[in-house]
Image (cartoon, rainbow, N blue to C red):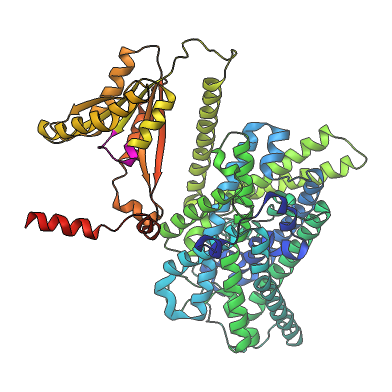
Amino acid sequence: MGLLDRILGRPLASSEAEEQKIGVLAGIPVLGLDGLSSSAYGPEAALTVLMPLGAAGLSYIEPISGIILALLGILYLSYRQTIAAYPTGGGSYTVASENLGTSAGLLAAAALIVDYILNVAVGISAGIGALVSAVPSLHHYILLLCLITLVLVTLVNLRGVRESGIAFGIPTYLFTGSLLLVIVIGLIKAIFHGGHPVPVVPPPPLPAGVKIVTLWLLMRSFASGCTAMTGVEAVSNGVNAFAKPAVQNAQRTLTAIVVLLGLLLAGIATLSRSYGIGAMDQTQVGYQSVISQMVLAVMGRGVFYYVTIGSVLTVLALSANTSFAGFPRLCRLIAEDDFLPHAFANVGRRLVYSYGIVILAVFAGALLIVFRGITDRLIPLFAVGAFGAFTLSQAGMVMHWKRHPGPRTGLSMAVNAVGAVATAAALIVILVAKFVEGAWITLVLIPGMLFLFARVRRHYDYVKKQIRCPHPLDLRNNDPPIVIVPIKGWDILTERALRFGLRLSPDVIAVHVALQPEEAEKPLRALWAREVEAPARQAGLNPPQLVVLPSPYRRLFTPLLDYVDQVLTENPNRIVAVVIPELAETHWYEYLLHNQRATVLKVLLYLRGHQRVVVINVPWYLQPESAFSQQQPSLRPALTRSKERHE
């Protein structure tokens, strides 16, 4: 088993695709981690904005969370309908493109791509933030830990959807189970103590308020709290990842995710107010996340605390998995429509879109580096893309029901219309509230993505026009090509390339660039007459011509390229085939010992863009040293005799 097989697993055949599909239990961790884990940083993001109000700010977290939960319910009903209407996958890009036009679809796609990238960065940074809460001595290593986690999540996803579901299942259910247990126990204590329970470990005292309550402050808090709803769309995007019956399994998975998320959000908001838990500055040493304070207040700092915080850390870090499941599928759809490079549509060794996974990891890593892995610095950029996609998807579904009326069309259209209006209103609030804090960056990135889509599509349209053949096979001027063989000297590579060239054409020219004085070429010409021309004449073939190009300034490629241009000019109706001898090593590290001139020459010929130049590589595969030594006679006696003659 090779190293790659050990890391990523054995390659999977296309026929194994059905076996890799998932059910509800695996679907929750694969497509719901983003939504579920956002309960660990969504309420905290809202509380962070309320920090200037001090203890008074806690009285607003419950109504703000109530509005967020109502919006979550609307999204749930809307996306449940979307799954039924688009059983092969009804993400925002598909729905908006089919019902609102290509431009709307691309806008939704650009918004989602930005959101997916941000989700990876925010999820991992929040996970490491939870770790730092439990182990403050790790505070100085936040960025390094973020990048290590990103690499691990990427590798797991490259192993396939089923593998990631198995790997992420245990921490996901441990996370939801432990947090729900904390919430239930905390609520029971609050009820028995008249809404003012005594914390086991008191949270840090909240500072005195330095600001008064304003509508603007509440809007900003709501906008930050809306980050808890990102990832809801992932299930509708990944319907084709489910085993049959795919639609029912997807709907059940969506229901489970939304119910669990709603319980977590409501419970965290209620306990935060009951126990007096507020947000803290993540950049300061001694930082404690809201979840950490809540578990300490309810359960104390025992084994359960570390198990819970460990599950929070794991799930937050792995919440990026939702983006790793959704981003490659979205990019595949866009690539199939020629708006992204076609490599995004290629299925990798483990039946996943490996190219999209790697690109997502690269961009998320860049974000983590730029913002130093601090969640609070990334949150202002978050949710803009998600709510833009939500709005376009719901508006597209309204048009879908209008075009495809049925028995319950009116009710379905009403649900999606309410969803479109609600998410559009939330988007406006998020944009206004977060614009100065960094949301303007998202508004720059999305047009940039649209420009990229347009340029990629323009290139593919241009290529299609260029390679379209409007006529039958043209056999005029179909003479054998003029074959040019660049050679270094007389060796087995040259011999193999010349033999191949003589199979193509009687006109073969071997070109040697003389980097040494003229006297150095005389032995080559004598060798050429004996080893090449004589055997060719005996076989009744036209002997390959030897052309020596002087290069007083020791340039190798320029004389060769100029000579190719000269042959093209002198033979305007002939194809010129450049046959390049190349040494193929058996181990990757052996390539470091050679100058790779053959590869450079091939690239330079391609870049010149001559339509009448054909480039052909003729490799000589280097044998392993052990196998080669067994085939060769010992050189020691010959070397001994040579030494004796010199003495």
421, 498: nearer the viewer: 498
Farthest residue to the right: give it. 407
Q: Residue at x 90, y 43 (%)?
A: 408
Whether residue 479 appears in this view of the structure is yes
Quadrant in the picture for the N terminus:
bottom right
- Seen in the picture, residue 541 relative to 271 is either above or below; the reply is above
643, 363: nearer the viewer: 643
Residue 476: percent from left, percent from top: 50, 10
Residue 213: percent from left, percent from top: 57, 63
Instruction: Name the side, left or right, on which 282 lies relative to 484.
Output: right
Instruction: Name the side, left or right, on which 66 lies relative to 566.
Output: right
Q: Is residue 491 magenta?
A: yes
Residue 170: percent from left, percent from top: 67, 73
Quadrant in the picture for the C terminus:
bottom left
419, 612: nearer the viewer: 612
431, 587: nearer the viewer: 587
Q: Residue at x 21, y 55 (%)?
A: 638
Q: Which residues are magenta?
A: 487-494
- Seen in the picture, residue 155 relative to 272 is either above or below; the reply is above
Residue 69: percent from left, percent from top: 72, 61
Farthest residue to the top: give it. 476
Instruction: Name the side, left or right, on which 174 lies relative to 644.
Output: right
